Amino acid sequence: MTARADSSLRVLVTGATGGIGRATCFALLAAARGRGLDFAIAAAASKRGPALDALVDELRAAGAQATGLAEDLADVGACGRLAQQAVAACGGLDVLVSNAGVSRSGPLATLEPADWDAVFNVDARATWLLARSAHAALKASRGAIVAIGSVSGLFPFPGLGAYSPAKAALLMLCRQLAQEWAADGIRVNTVSPGLIRTPLTEPIYRDEEITRRRMDAVPLGRIGTPDDVARAVVHLAGPDAGYATGIDLRVDGGLCDHLLSTIPGKPRPAPPR
Ligand SMILES: NC(=O)c1ccc[n+]([C@@H]2O[C@H](COP(=O)([O-])OP(=O)(O)OC[C@H]3O[C@@H](n4cnc5c(N)ncnc54)[C@H](OP(=O)(O)O)[C@@H]3O)[C@@H](O)[C@H]2O)c1
Protein backbone atom coordinates (compact mmCIF):
# COMPACT_ATOMS: atom_id res chain seq x y z
CA MET A 1 0.00 0.00 0.00
CA THR A 2 1.40 3.43 -0.98
CA ALA A 3 1.32 6.20 1.64
CA ARG A 4 -0.92 9.19 0.86
CA ALA A 5 0.75 12.58 0.64
CA ASP A 6 -1.90 14.43 2.63
CA SER A 7 -2.13 12.04 5.57
CA SER A 8 1.34 10.48 5.83
CA LEU A 9 4.84 11.34 6.87
CA ARG A 10 7.21 9.78 4.31
CA VAL A 11 10.88 9.65 5.25
CA LEU A 12 14.25 8.30 4.16
CA VAL A 13 16.82 7.77 6.92
CA THR A 14 20.37 6.73 5.97
CA GLY A 15 22.63 4.92 8.41
CA ALA A 16 19.34 3.69 9.88
CA THR A 17 20.77 0.69 11.72
CA GLY A 18 23.37 2.77 13.57
CA GLY A 19 22.93 4.44 16.95
CA ILE A 20 21.60 7.86 15.92
CA GLY A 21 19.90 6.53 12.79
CA ARG A 22 17.87 3.94 14.64
CA ALA A 23 16.77 6.41 17.32
CA THR A 24 15.78 8.84 14.56
CA CYS A 25 13.60 6.25 12.82
CA PHE A 26 11.57 5.65 15.99
CA ALA A 27 11.46 9.34 16.97
CA LEU A 28 10.05 10.22 13.54
CA LEU A 29 7.49 7.42 13.91
CA ALA A 30 6.41 8.81 17.29
CA ALA A 31 6.19 12.32 15.82
CA ALA A 32 3.99 11.08 12.97
CA ARG A 33 1.73 9.37 15.49
CA GLY A 34 1.54 12.55 17.53
CA ARG A 35 0.36 14.45 14.46
CA GLY A 36 -2.17 11.74 13.54
CA LEU A 37 -0.24 10.77 10.40
CA ASP A 38 0.53 7.40 8.86
CA PHE A 39 4.25 6.72 8.66
CA ALA A 40 6.15 5.39 5.65
CA ILE A 41 9.89 4.94 6.04
CA ALA A 42 12.74 3.84 3.83
CA ALA A 43 15.42 2.71 6.27
CA ALA A 44 18.80 2.53 4.55
CA ALA A 45 21.95 0.67 5.48
CA SER A 46 25.18 0.07 3.60
CA LYS A 47 24.34 -3.59 3.10
CA ARG A 48 21.57 -6.11 3.62
CA GLY A 49 21.79 -8.26 6.70
CA PRO A 50 20.19 -9.19 10.02
CA ALA A 51 20.51 -5.68 11.50
CA LEU A 52 18.48 -4.10 8.68
CA ASP A 53 15.94 -6.95 8.65
CA ALA A 54 15.44 -6.64 12.42
CA LEU A 55 14.98 -2.86 12.22
CA VAL A 56 12.39 -3.17 9.46
CA ASP A 57 10.55 -5.87 11.42
CA GLU A 58 10.50 -3.66 14.53
CA LEU A 59 9.24 -0.63 12.60
CA ARG A 60 6.50 -2.70 10.98
CA ALA A 61 5.51 -4.16 14.34
CA ALA A 62 5.19 -0.58 15.60
CA GLY A 63 2.79 0.19 12.74
CA ALA A 64 5.08 1.77 10.13
CA GLN A 65 5.04 1.03 6.42
CA ALA A 66 8.76 0.20 6.40
CA THR A 67 11.10 -0.73 3.56
CA GLY A 68 14.73 -1.71 4.05
CA LEU A 69 17.13 -0.45 1.39
CA ALA A 70 20.85 -1.13 1.02
CA GLU A 71 23.37 0.94 -0.93
CA ASP A 72 27.00 1.91 -0.40
CA LEU A 73 26.81 5.71 -0.19
CA ALA A 74 30.51 6.02 -1.05
CA ASP A 75 29.48 5.01 -4.56
CA VAL A 76 28.46 7.96 -6.74
CA GLY A 77 25.63 6.14 -8.52
CA ALA A 78 24.27 4.48 -5.40
CA CYS A 79 23.11 7.72 -3.75
CA GLY A 80 20.76 8.63 -6.58
CA ARG A 81 19.52 5.06 -6.78
CA LEU A 82 18.78 5.00 -3.07
CA ALA A 83 16.80 8.23 -3.12
CA GLN A 84 14.72 7.03 -6.10
CA GLN A 85 14.04 3.66 -4.43
CA ALA A 86 12.92 5.50 -1.29
CA VAL A 87 10.58 7.80 -3.22
CA ALA A 88 9.07 4.79 -4.99
CA ALA A 89 8.69 2.76 -1.79
CA CYS A 90 7.12 5.60 0.20
CA GLY A 91 5.00 7.11 -2.61
CA GLY A 92 6.89 10.42 -2.36
CA LEU A 93 9.11 12.00 0.25
CA ASP A 94 8.59 14.56 3.00
CA VAL A 95 11.85 14.22 4.95
CA LEU A 96 15.39 13.12 4.07
CA VAL A 97 17.61 12.45 7.07
CA SER A 98 21.18 12.11 5.82
CA ASN A 99 22.79 10.49 8.81
CA ALA A 100 25.30 7.93 7.50
CA GLY A 101 28.85 8.81 8.40
CA VAL A 102 32.31 7.31 8.69
CA SER A 103 35.62 8.37 10.16
CA ARG A 104 39.14 7.19 9.47
CA SER A 105 41.68 8.54 11.87
CA GLY A 106 45.22 9.61 11.04
CA PRO A 107 47.36 12.75 10.96
CA LEU A 108 47.02 14.79 7.77
CA ALA A 109 50.78 14.57 7.15
CA THR A 110 50.47 10.88 6.38
CA LEU A 111 46.79 10.42 5.53
CA GLU A 112 46.26 8.46 2.32
CA PRO A 113 44.18 10.21 -0.37
CA ALA A 114 41.99 7.09 -0.51
CA ASP A 115 41.08 7.60 3.16
CA TRP A 116 40.35 11.29 2.53
CA ASP A 117 38.05 10.32 -0.36
CA ALA A 118 36.34 7.55 1.62
CA VAL A 119 35.36 10.03 4.34
CA PHE A 120 34.41 12.92 2.04
CA ASN A 121 32.34 10.65 -0.21
CA VAL A 122 30.09 9.49 2.62
CA ASP A 123 30.19 12.44 5.05
CA ALA A 124 29.81 15.25 2.50
CA ARG A 125 29.15 14.19 -1.10
CA ALA A 126 26.44 11.62 -0.35
CA THR A 127 24.15 14.24 1.17
CA TRP A 128 24.37 16.36 -1.97
CA LEU A 129 23.73 13.38 -4.28
CA LEU A 130 20.83 12.10 -2.18
CA ALA A 131 19.31 15.58 -2.02
CA ARG A 132 19.80 16.14 -5.75
CA SER A 133 18.02 12.91 -6.58
CA ALA A 134 15.21 13.58 -4.08
CA HIS A 135 14.79 17.24 -5.14
CA ALA A 136 11.66 16.77 -7.28
CA ALA A 137 9.91 14.69 -4.61
CA LEU A 138 10.84 17.14 -1.83
CA LYS A 139 9.72 20.07 -3.96
CA ALA A 140 6.36 18.37 -4.52
CA SER A 141 5.88 17.89 -0.77
CA ARG A 142 7.58 21.16 0.32
CA GLY A 143 9.69 18.85 2.42
CA ALA A 144 12.77 19.05 4.61
CA ILE A 145 16.32 17.75 4.74
CA VAL A 146 18.21 17.23 7.99
CA ALA A 147 21.85 16.16 7.76
CA ILE A 148 23.90 14.99 10.70
CA GLY A 149 27.07 17.02 11.03
CA SER A 150 29.32 17.04 14.06
CA VAL A 151 30.97 19.50 16.42
CA SER A 152 34.07 18.29 14.54
CA GLY A 153 32.75 20.27 11.60
CA LEU A 154 32.82 23.42 13.73
CA PHE A 155 36.20 22.85 15.40
CA PRO A 156 39.33 21.07 14.13
CA PHE A 157 39.86 17.59 15.52
CA PRO A 158 43.61 16.91 15.06
CA GLY A 159 44.32 13.27 14.30
CA LEU A 160 40.88 12.49 12.95
CA GLY A 161 41.98 12.65 9.31
CA ALA A 162 39.45 14.13 6.90
CA TYR A 163 36.51 13.93 9.33
CA SER A 164 36.50 17.59 10.43
CA PRO A 165 37.03 18.97 6.91
CA ALA A 166 34.28 16.70 5.56
CA LYS A 167 31.75 17.65 8.25
CA ALA A 168 32.61 21.34 7.76
CA ALA A 169 31.92 20.88 4.04
CA LEU A 170 28.61 19.21 4.90
CA LEU A 171 27.49 22.19 7.00
CA MET A 172 28.23 24.64 4.16
CA LEU A 173 26.67 22.32 1.58
CA CYS A 174 23.42 22.38 3.57
CA ARG A 175 23.48 26.16 3.99
CA GLN A 176 23.92 26.50 0.24
CA LEU A 177 21.14 24.00 -0.51
CA ALA A 178 18.92 25.94 1.90
CA GLN A 179 19.45 29.09 -0.16
CA GLU A 180 19.08 27.43 -3.55
CA TRP A 181 15.96 25.46 -2.62
CA ALA A 182 14.10 27.90 -0.37
CA ALA A 183 12.04 29.04 -3.36
CA ASP A 184 10.96 25.42 -3.80
CA GLY A 185 9.72 25.33 -0.22
CA ILE A 186 12.42 22.85 0.83
CA ARG A 187 14.09 23.53 4.19
CA VAL A 188 17.63 22.25 4.75
CA ASN A 189 19.22 22.16 8.21
CA THR A 190 21.89 20.28 10.13
CA VAL A 191 22.31 18.84 13.60
CA SER A 192 25.83 18.80 15.05
CA PRO A 193 26.12 16.26 17.85
CA GLY A 194 28.85 16.43 20.47
CA LEU A 195 29.86 13.39 22.52
CA ILE A 196 27.21 10.73 21.90
CA ARG A 197 27.38 7.11 23.03
CA THR A 198 26.62 4.92 19.99
CA PRO A 199 28.09 1.74 18.43
CA LEU A 200 30.56 4.06 16.64
CA THR A 201 31.95 5.46 19.90
CA GLU A 202 31.23 2.53 22.24
CA PRO A 203 34.88 1.34 22.33
CA ILE A 204 35.89 4.69 23.87
CA TYR A 205 33.18 4.56 26.56
CA ARG A 206 34.16 1.07 27.67
CA ASP A 207 37.02 2.88 29.43
CA GLU A 208 35.43 4.20 32.66
CA GLU A 209 38.20 6.73 33.34
CA ILE A 210 37.92 8.30 29.88
CA THR A 211 34.15 8.35 30.19
CA ARG A 212 34.37 10.17 33.53
CA ARG A 213 36.83 12.73 32.13
CA ARG A 214 34.64 13.29 29.07
CA MET A 215 31.59 13.83 31.30
CA ASP A 216 33.60 16.39 33.28
CA ALA A 217 34.23 18.27 30.02
CA VAL A 218 30.51 18.58 29.26
CA PRO A 219 28.75 21.39 31.17
CA LEU A 220 25.50 19.38 31.30
CA GLY A 221 27.54 16.65 33.00
CA ARG A 222 26.74 13.62 30.87
CA ILE A 223 27.45 11.92 27.56
CA GLY A 224 24.66 12.42 25.01
CA THR A 225 22.34 9.67 23.84
CA PRO A 226 21.07 8.87 20.34
CA ASP A 227 17.63 10.06 21.50
CA ASP A 228 19.07 13.49 22.33
CA VAL A 229 20.10 13.84 18.69
CA ALA A 230 16.94 12.22 17.29
CA ARG A 231 14.71 14.74 19.09
CA ALA A 232 16.66 17.60 17.47
CA VAL A 233 16.23 15.96 14.05
CA VAL A 234 12.48 15.61 14.58
CA HIS A 235 12.25 19.27 15.56
CA LEU A 236 14.10 20.52 12.47
CA ALA A 237 12.19 18.14 10.17
CA GLY A 238 8.78 19.12 11.50
CA PRO A 239 6.34 22.02 11.36
CA ASP A 240 7.62 23.58 14.60
CA ALA A 241 10.76 24.55 12.65
CA GLY A 242 8.77 25.66 9.60
CA TYR A 243 10.59 29.03 9.40
CA ALA A 244 14.10 27.63 10.02
CA THR A 245 16.37 26.88 7.11
CA GLY A 246 20.15 26.90 6.73
CA ILE A 247 20.72 26.55 10.47
CA ASP A 248 22.90 24.19 12.46
CA LEU A 249 21.54 22.93 15.77
CA ARG A 250 24.40 22.01 18.07
CA VAL A 251 23.45 19.18 20.46
CA ASP A 252 26.53 18.94 22.67
CA GLY A 253 25.53 19.63 26.27
CA GLY A 254 27.47 22.90 26.11
CA LEU A 255 30.78 21.20 25.23
CA CYS A 256 31.93 23.62 22.53
CA ASP A 257 31.27 26.79 24.52
CA HIS A 258 33.16 25.38 27.49
CA LEU A 259 36.60 26.22 26.06
CA LEU A 260 37.17 29.56 27.80
CA SER A 261 36.10 28.07 31.14
CA THR A 262 39.15 25.80 30.97
CA ILE A 263 41.69 28.67 30.76
CA PRO A 264 44.00 28.54 33.80
CA GLY A 265 43.87 31.63 36.03
CA LYS A 266 40.55 32.94 34.77
CA PRO A 267 38.71 35.20 37.22
CA ARG A 268 36.63 33.31 39.76
CA PRO A 269 33.35 34.67 41.08
CA ALA A 270 33.73 36.20 44.56
CA PRO A 271 32.56 33.87 47.33
CA PRO A 272 29.17 34.77 48.82
CA ARG A 273 29.41 37.18 51.82
N1 LIG B 1 28.49 9.18 17.99
C1 LIG B 1 28.96 10.41 18.09
O1 LIG B 1 29.56 10.80 19.13
C2 LIG B 1 28.80 11.37 16.94
C3 LIG B 1 29.18 12.69 17.16
C4 LIG B 1 29.06 13.60 16.13
C5 LIG B 1 28.52 13.21 14.91
N2 LIG B 1 28.16 11.91 14.70
C6 LIG B 1 27.60 11.58 13.38
O2 LIG B 1 26.34 10.97 13.55
C7 LIG B 1 26.07 10.10 12.46
C8 LIG B 1 25.65 8.74 12.99
O3 LIG B 1 26.71 8.22 13.77
P1 LIG B 1 26.54 7.08 14.88
O4 LIG B 1 27.33 7.51 16.05
O5 LIG B 1 25.11 6.71 15.03
O6 LIG B 1 27.39 5.93 14.18
P2 LIG B 1 27.08 4.42 13.73
O7 LIG B 1 26.29 3.76 14.79
O8 LIG B 1 28.37 3.84 13.30
O9 LIG B 1 26.14 4.69 12.46
C9 LIG B 1 26.70 5.16 11.24
C10 LIG B 1 25.89 4.57 10.13
O10 LIG B 1 26.40 5.06 8.88
C11 LIG B 1 26.27 4.03 7.95
N3 LIG B 1 27.29 4.08 6.91
C12 LIG B 1 28.63 4.23 7.06
N4 LIG B 1 29.24 4.15 5.86
C13 LIG B 1 28.26 3.95 4.93
C14 LIG B 1 28.26 3.79 3.52
N5 LIG B 1 29.40 3.78 2.81
N6 LIG B 1 27.07 3.59 2.90
C15 LIG B 1 25.92 3.57 3.60
N7 LIG B 1 25.85 3.73 4.94
C16 LIG B 1 27.01 3.91 5.59
C17 LIG B 1 26.46 2.74 8.71
O11 LIG B 1 25.69 1.76 8.06
P3 LIG B 1 26.06 0.18 8.10
O12 LIG B 1 26.12 -0.17 9.57
O13 LIG B 1 24.96 -0.47 7.37
O14 LIG B 1 27.42 0.06 7.43
C18 LIG B 1 25.97 3.06 10.11
O15 LIG B 1 24.69 2.53 10.34
C19 LIG B 1 27.34 10.06 11.63
O16 LIG B 1 27.21 10.94 10.53
C20 LIG B 1 28.41 10.56 12.59
O17 LIG B 1 29.49 11.17 11.91
C21 LIG B 1 28.28 10.99 15.70
Image: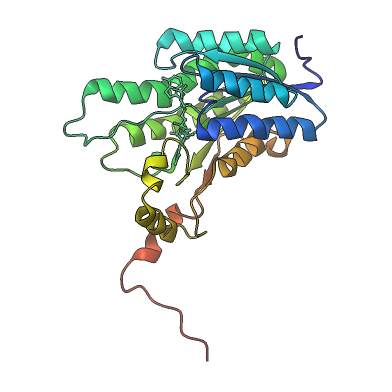
Q: Residue at x 55, y 38 (%)?
A: 247
Tell me residue 101's x, y (percent).
43, 28
Depicted 261 relative to depicted 71: above or below: below
The extreme bottom residue here reads 273
Quadrant housing residue 189? top right
Tell me residue 6's x, y (percent).
81, 19
Residue 270 makes an appearance in the image: yes
Residue placed most toward the observer, 172 or 236: 236
Quadrant housing residue 68? top right
Tell me residue 66's x, y (percent).
67, 18
Depicted 193 relative to depicted 163: above or below: below
Residue placed most toward the observer, 226 or 156: 226
Tell me residue 218's x, y (percent).
45, 57
Question: In the figure, is residue 35 to the left or right of 204?
Answer: right
How is the structure coloured here? rainbow
- Where, quadrant-wise, is the N terminus in this rendering? top right
